[in-house]
Amino acid sequence: MVCDVNKIDSNISGLSFAEEECLKQLPVTPVWFGLEPNSYSDFGGEVTTVARAPIDPSRQRKKGTVTDLDASGGFNTDVTADNITRLMQGFCFADARQQPQTAPLNAAKVSMTGVDGDDIKYTAASGLGIFAAGNLIVASGFAVPTNNGMKKVSDAIATAVTVWGALSDEGAAPNGALTRVGHEFASGDVALTYAAGLLTLTATAGTFAFGLIPGQWVFIGGDGAGTSFANNVGYARVAAISTDNKTVTLDNATWTPVTEAGTGITLQVYFGTVIRNEKAANLIKRRSYQLERTLGQDADGMQSEYLVGAVANEFTLNIPQADKLNADVTFVACDNEQRTGAVGLKAGTRVSALGQSAFNTSSDVYRIRMSVNNSANPNPTPLFGYISEGSIEVNNNITPNKAVGVLGAFDTSAGDFEVGGSVTAYFTTVAATQAVRNNADVGIYAILAANNRGMIYDIPLLALGGGRINVEKDNPITVPLDTNGAESKFGHTLLVEFFEYLPNKAMPQ
């Protein structure tokens, strides 16, 4: 006996996305990446119909016709180490700036042919010459657990990467991947100088030629003995790099800087994947996606609906008190499709959601700091100590383009790239309110870290609004502030950096 299906529960549904080759067109073999939505907002298509209302003694309307379709969708998701990295490219209209790795976001993957335990090396047919001695790499996806984790490269050629330590023999590893996450310099090679308000790292024999750009962040110091300075340990932003890559000028250091010669120190420096809104026209790239929502089984198979030609519109990073970090994302699409179980899902390779732990706002926040920009002070005084809640908001101001003969939209147009948000800070001094009144040049950043992973959201230049001090009986005084980002000296308004590995010292203490 076949029973009728009277309902389908929401927990049966699923969500994934694939990047289109061009607007409204998938590649021959798309890759569908699974997502973990907590909830949806207006997902699907809204059809507009217009009824006929001729002059008639019966005063009855005639059946109308479909005249328009507005397709859009959004969802809320917890923020984990990797689940929003790909999508941030869409919101920033840019390719990620990645360190050398065998499984890049936007290029072909290098297939690992195995692991040689005797010679302590990872092997591939080609493509491993992107690494160099002294690089710190993270191995992931290998079947033998000891072959995963952070390793230091001793030598690299096109077909092999030799590392220090120990590895176990392993055959072909299709899921294995290597990513450069930092570098360890030779003993005594790097010195840190702090003089006249200028904080610099200088290498004598080596260089900082790791593709670093002004505006991105680094973590200075490792966990091993002799891999950190005695006093200068923490995160800092790259303010400038010399043309010979020998000297890096830093600002926004999370420690109180002092000069250190670095004698006997094999300094480790860590960096990550950078995604920012780009200034150069040749680096600006609009992405479009198809979002697939499965809707459970009918009599013939899995039902589904799709947003087609979907362009990333709004992103909000929510930073609530004593909760998970989460994000609201929305897309404006050109069309909406439904498929029955008989038609089936669209073709392609499907990658399940990683199921990683979410960052929380209690123990995984290393620092949230807002301060008045000061080029003469690499560790500026914060405008507040703690916040009760906050948000960082991105809006691409996407609008659908309508035309005669088209149901839905034939394309989309992007407006200004707007970055803002809000912060409710605990009051300590009147500095924040004065910064609002003075229209001061202010910056804000949030550093999140857990389980040797991390990410940084940085708005280097913004104007403040609000600032009306809130005083309530039996409660701490608070200051609500609105943030309005602007193009900074680095050429971007927002930069997000994802660290594939960070040492234990980089975790919130």
Image (cartoon, helix red, strand yellow):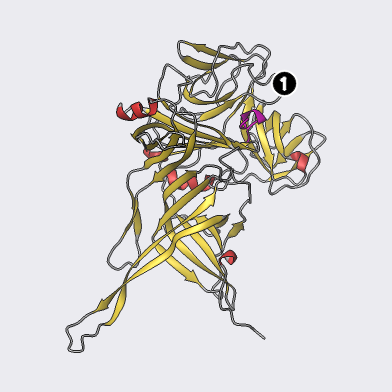
Work out which residue is located at the far right of the displayed protein and give it. Answer: 118
Q: Residue 277, how many percent across, how many down?
A: 42, 39
Work out which residue is located at the far front of the displayed protein and give it. Answer: 473
User: Is 44 on the left or on the right of 102, as rendered?
Assistant: left
User: Is 139 on the left or on the right of 496, as rendered?
Assistant: right
| Residue 448 drawn above or below residue 230 | below
Instruction: Tell me which residue sits at (53%, 60%) in the image.
Output: 28
Instruction: Tell me which residue sits at (58%, 25%) in the image.
Output: 234
Instruction: Tell me which residue sits at (45%, 18%) in the image.
Output: 377
| Residue 268 drawn above or below residue 49 | above
Is residue 412 in view? yes
Q: Which residues are magenta?
A: 499-509
Circle 1 sits in a helix, a strand or a loop, which is it? loop
Give amino acid for label 1: Ala
Instruction: Tell me which residue sits at (61%, 53%) in the image.
Output: 353
Q: In front here: 113 or 408? A: 408
